[in-house]
Amino acid sequence: MPPLIRFASLLPLAFALSASALDLSRKPPGGSELLPADQAFQLVSAQRTAEGVRLSWMIAPGYYLYRQRFAAEPADGGAPLAALRLPKGAAKHDEHFGDVEIYTEAVDADLPVARGQTAPTRLKLRWQGCAEAGVCYPPVSRIVDVAAAP
């Protein structure tokens, strides 16, 4: 099958998946409205440490973040960064992404910086999560200022 026809045949599936992933009008158990992504997955701190940067998220009850969907890079085009260090998550079989690891309640991630380098002052962060009600949010992307160590 030619590539263009193959691509066109996948479009209805892509639209169906994105429609279910973005349907924020669905209600979680208990009947309340779904939270906006920034309330469901709240980045509470981006703090310099002796080893780099510590990032912390609070996750609202009934929501979870995917371990495999975190990313960080310098916001101002600086030197590439090491991979985020994340704790092991809870195993989950997800209808959208298959077997994944997730975080509920909270998660801390460390972004190490090589010896002799300074931690970036601004980061571009990405994360993605879902509501237990079966609605997945689009990836969240934010540029954040990194606070100095206390």
Image (tube, helix red, strand yellow):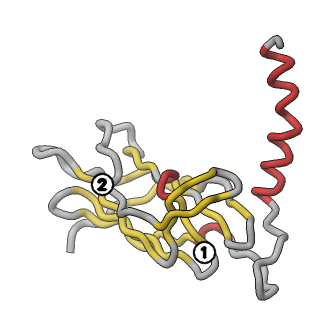
Mark 1, secondary structure of its residue: helix
Q: Residues within 10 Å of mark 1 (few under 14, many from 20)?
A: few
Task: State the image coordinates of residue 18 (x, y, percent, origin top left).
Answer: 78, 49
- Assign the N terminus to one quadrant of the image: top right
Of labels 2 and 1, earlier in sequence is 1
Residue occupying image coordinates x 68% and y 72%: 132
- Point out residue 35 in the picture as x, y percentages from the top left corner: 69, 75
Crowd band around label 2 with a 10 angstrom C-alpha radius: few (<14), some (14–19), many (20+) = many
Q: Which residue is disc 2 drawn over?
A: 111
Furthest residue toward top: 2
Q: Position of residue 41 (x, y in %)?
A: 56, 70
Q: Quadrant of the C terminus?
A: bottom left
Residue 116 vs residue 132, the one in the foreground: 132
The residue pinned by badge 1 equals: 39
- Rendering coords of residue 93 (x, y %): 61, 59
Q: Is residue 12 above or below residue 104?
A: above
Badge 2 amino acid = Leu
Give the total number of marks visible in the rendering.
2
Q: Is residue 53 left or right of residue 7?
A: left
- Front one among 14 and 100: 100
- Who's the residue at 38% across and 62% down the image? 88
Spatial separation of the CA atoms under disc 2 and disc 1: 23 Å
The one of 29 and 120 positioned closer to us in this rendering: 29
Secondary structure at badge 2 equals: strand
Q: Residue at x 11, y 46 (%)?
A: 115
| Vertical side of 77 occupied by 118: above or below | below
For badge 1, the amino acid type reads Gln
